[in-house]
C-alpha cells in the first residue's frame, strides 16, 4: 500500500548495551533477544514496538512495528520497551546507553559483528570497508521514514528533505567525544559518516542527495552508479542498492519512503520523538511552499548544501550561517546561528506539536544540543573517570526519561 505525504511515519532508535560497572560495550544483543523471545531471532515484535539486531553485536534497534499514523505519545511506547530491556539486562549486569557514540570504545579491539542471521552481508561489508571504525561500529541514530505515493509527492518531499538536512545536526548532535577526547566535532558520528565508505564514494555521495526528483532519474543518477561500483566486490550478488545507498536521506522505492539518517540519538525517547515531530512539521512547512517555491528548492546543488552541513556538524547549534540565499528561505536577512534558524521555524510550527513535544524542543532550543550539554558537563576534564560520570548520568536519563542537564 502506498501512503500519501505525512499520512504515516516510521521511527527507528538505536541503543548500545554496556556493562554496568566498566561501561564497556557488551556484544550480547543475541542474549537479550533470546531472553525476550525464548529462542534467538533477529526481530522480536513487542506490541507497537519491534526489537532487532544491527551490524554490530552490542547495538539493539527499537522501531515502530509497522507505520504509525501519529507521533503523539509514541515516546511512551519506546520508553516502556527501554524499561523492559533494562530490566532484562539487569540480569546480565548491563544497561542501555544513549548518545550517538560511545566516548571510550576502542573499536579496533571491541568491535564484534552480528554473527547470526544475515551475517554474510555484514561480513561482506567488513571485507570491503573494515567495519571496526567509529563510523561503522560506534554509531547510534534515529531514522525517520516518511512516505510518498507517487513521483509528484516524491518530488516535493525529496526537495524539502534536501533543504532541511544541513541544519538537522544543529538540533540533534550528541556525539562530541570519541577515544576519550573532544573530537572537535559536536556531531562526530556524521563526521565519520562522510568518509566511512571512501572505498566506494558513490555509496555516500555528498551526504546530501543529488538533485533528482523522480524514480527514473534516481535510478540513473544514484542507484546505477552504486550498482556498477559495487559489482566487483559483490560477487555473490547479495547486496541491495536500497541498503547500499548511504546518503543522509535515502529513497526507498521498495516501500515508497524517504529515510532520514542524519539524526543522532538523544538521551531520552521523549527528546527523539519531539525532534522527529519538529522535523516533520518543518518539512510540511517547506512542502507547502509557504517559505519558498518548490522550483527554488530544487535549484539547490548538493555541494552548496553540503558546505552548510559540513560546518554544522562541527559547531551544531552555534554554527554561524553566512549563506544569504539559504537564510532567505527562512526569512532571515543577516548572518545567523543555526539555533536561530530553528527558533524561527519553531515560531511558525511549534503550536502544531503536542505539549510534551513543545516542552522538549523548547528545552533543546534554550539549553543547546545534547553535545553542547555533554561538553558543558565535562568542563574540559576528559579523564576516564569524568567521562564515565557524565555518560552514566545519560544512562540514568534514558532509564528515567528525563532530559540531561549538565
Image (cartoon, helix red, strand yellow):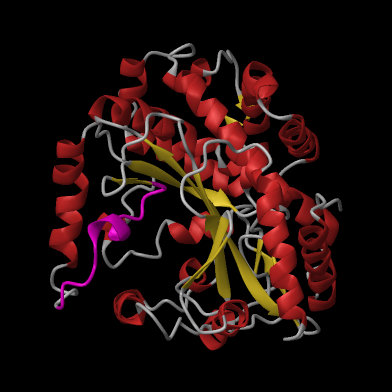
Q: Tell whether position 242 is magenta.
A: yes
Q: Main secondary structure of the magenta part?
A: loop
Do we see residue 122 in this rendering?
yes
- Percent position (x, y) of residue 360? 76, 38
Q: Nearer the viewer, residue 78 or 374?
A: 78
Q: Nearer the viewer, residue 116 or 140?
A: 116
Q: Is residue 1 above or below residue 298?
A: below
Q: Nearer the viewer, residue 5 or 363?
A: 5
- Percent position (x, y) of residue 202? 25, 55
Residue 93 located left or right of residue 256: right
Q: Nearer the viewer, residue 266 or 82?
A: 82
Q: Is residue 248 above or below residue 348?
A: below
Residue at left offset 77%, top offset 56%: 374
Residue 203 located left or right of residue 74: left
Residue 352 located left or right of residue 151: right
Q: Tell whether position 177 is magenta.
A: no
Residue at left offset 74%, top offset 31%: 358
- Percent position (x, y) of residue 200? 26, 64
Q: How many marks?
A: 0
**Magenta-highlighted residues:** 236-249
Do we see residue 322 in this rendering?
no
Amino acid at each position: 500500500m502506498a501512503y500519501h505525504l505525512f499520512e504515516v511515519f516510521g521511527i527507528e532508535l538505536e541503543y548500545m548495551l554496556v556493562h554496568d560497572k566498566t561501561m564497556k560495550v557488551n556484544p550480547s544483543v543475541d542474549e537479550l533477544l533470546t531472553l525476550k523471545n525464548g529462542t534467538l531471532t533477529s526481530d522480536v515484535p513487542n506490541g507497537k514496538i519491534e526489537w532487532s539486531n544491527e551490524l554490530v553485536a552490542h547495538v539493539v534497534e527499537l522501531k515502530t512495528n509497522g507505520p504509525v499514523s501519529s507521533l503523539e505519545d509514541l515516546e511512551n511506547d519506546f520508553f516502556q520497551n527501554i524499561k523492559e530491556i533494562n530490566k532484562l539486562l539487569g540480569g546480565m549486569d548491563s544497561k542501555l546507553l544513549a548518545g550517538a557514540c560511545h566516548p571510550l570504545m576502542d573499536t579496533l579491539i571491541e568491535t564484534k559483528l552480528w554473527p547470526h542471521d544475515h551475517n554474510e552481508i555484514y561480513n561482506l561489508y567488513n571485507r570491503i570497508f573494515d567495519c571496526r571504525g567509529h563510523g561503522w561500529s560506534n554509531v547510534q541514530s534515529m531514522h525517520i521514514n516518511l512516505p510518498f505515493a507517487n513521483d509528484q509527492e516524491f518530488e516535493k518531499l525529496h526537495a524539502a528533505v534536501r533543504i532541511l538536512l544541513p541544519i538537522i545536526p544543529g538540533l540533534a548532535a550528541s556525539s562530541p567525544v570519541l577515544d576519550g577526547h573532544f573530537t572537535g566535532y559536536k556531531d562526530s558520528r556524521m563526521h565519520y559518516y562522510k568518509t566511512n565508505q571512501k572505498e566506494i564514494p558513490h555509496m555516500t555521495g555528498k551526504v546530501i542527495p543529488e538533485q533528482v526528483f523522480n524514480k527514473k532519474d534516481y535510478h540513473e543518477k544514484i542507484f546505477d552508479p552504486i550498482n556498477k561500483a559495487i559489482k566487483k566486490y559483490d560477487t555473490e550478488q547479495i547486496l541491495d542498492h536500497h541498503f547500499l545507498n548511504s546518503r543522509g536521506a535515502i529513497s526507498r522505492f521498495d516501500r515508497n519512503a524517504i529515510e532520514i539518517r542524519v539524526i543522532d540519538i538523544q538521551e531520552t525517547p521523549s527528546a527523539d520523538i519531539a525532534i522527529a515531530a519538529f522535523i516533520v512539521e518543518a518539512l510540511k512547512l517547506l512542502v507547502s511552499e509557504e517559505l519558498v517555491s518548490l522550483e527554488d528548492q530544487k535549484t539547490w546543488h548538493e555541494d552548496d548544501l553540503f558546505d552548510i552541513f559540513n560546518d554544522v556538524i562541527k559547531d551544531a547549534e552555534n554554527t554561524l550561517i553566512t549563506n544569504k540565499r539559504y537564510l532567505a528561505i527562512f526569512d532571515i536577512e543577516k548572518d545567523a546561528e543555526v539555533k536561530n534558524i530553528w527558533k524561527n521555524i519553531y515560531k511558525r510550527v511549534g503550536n502544531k506539536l503536542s505539549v510534551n513535544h513543545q516542552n522538549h524542543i523548547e528545552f533543546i532550543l534554550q539549553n543547546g544540543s545534547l553535545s553542547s550539554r555533554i561538553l558543558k558537563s565535562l568542563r574540559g576534564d576528559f579523564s576516564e573517570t569524568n567521562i564515565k560520570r557524565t555518560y552514566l548520568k545519560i544512562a540514568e536519563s534514558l532509564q528515567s526519561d528525563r532530559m540531561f542537564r549538565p
